[in-house]
Image: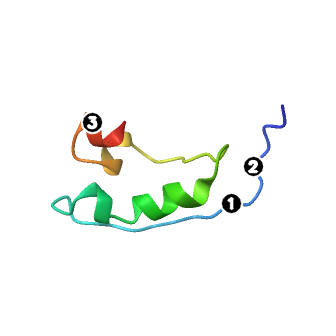
Amino acid sequence: MDRTPGNVDFVQKVDSGKVSWKRRRITEVIDMLGENGWLIVPELSRCGRSKLEIL
């Protein structure tokens, strides 16, 4: 299996923690990933307010 990254996009965006995860930019990024895409974040807590949102 080829483990080298293809296209690499860096996204830096700060959304308020009060904004629903459905309205955050993270949903756009996840949609862009595709079937075998990777998402690398500095810490998982930045992706959502609760464990359920992150999963």
Horizontal placement of 8 versus 42: left or right? right
Tell me residue 51's x, y (percent).
27, 34
Residue positioned most to the top: 1
Q: Are marks 1 and 2 in contact (CB under 8 Å)?
A: yes
Q: Quadrant of residue 36?
A: top right
Tell me residue 43's x, y (percent).
39, 43
Image disc number at residue 37: none
Q: Nearer the viewer, mark 1 or mark 3?
A: 3
Whichever of labels 2 and 3 marks the residue nearer the N terminus, that label is 2
Horizontal placement of 40 versus 20: left or right? right
Depicted 44 relative to depicted 30: above or below: above
Say which amino acid is labelled 2.
Pro
Residue identified by numbered label 3: 52
**What's the CA distance linking mark 1 and mark 2?**
7 Å
Residue identified by numbered label 2: 5
| Disc 1 residue crowd, few under 14, some 14–19, many 20+, Cα 10 Å | few
Say which amino acid is labelled 1.
Val
- Per the image, label 2 sits on a secondary structure element best described as loop
Residue shown at 53% from the left, 46% from the top: 40
Residue identified by numbered label 1: 8
Residue shown at 84% from the left, 37% from the top: 2
Tell me residue 12's x, y (percent).
45, 67
Q: How many numbered circles does the render carry?
A: 3
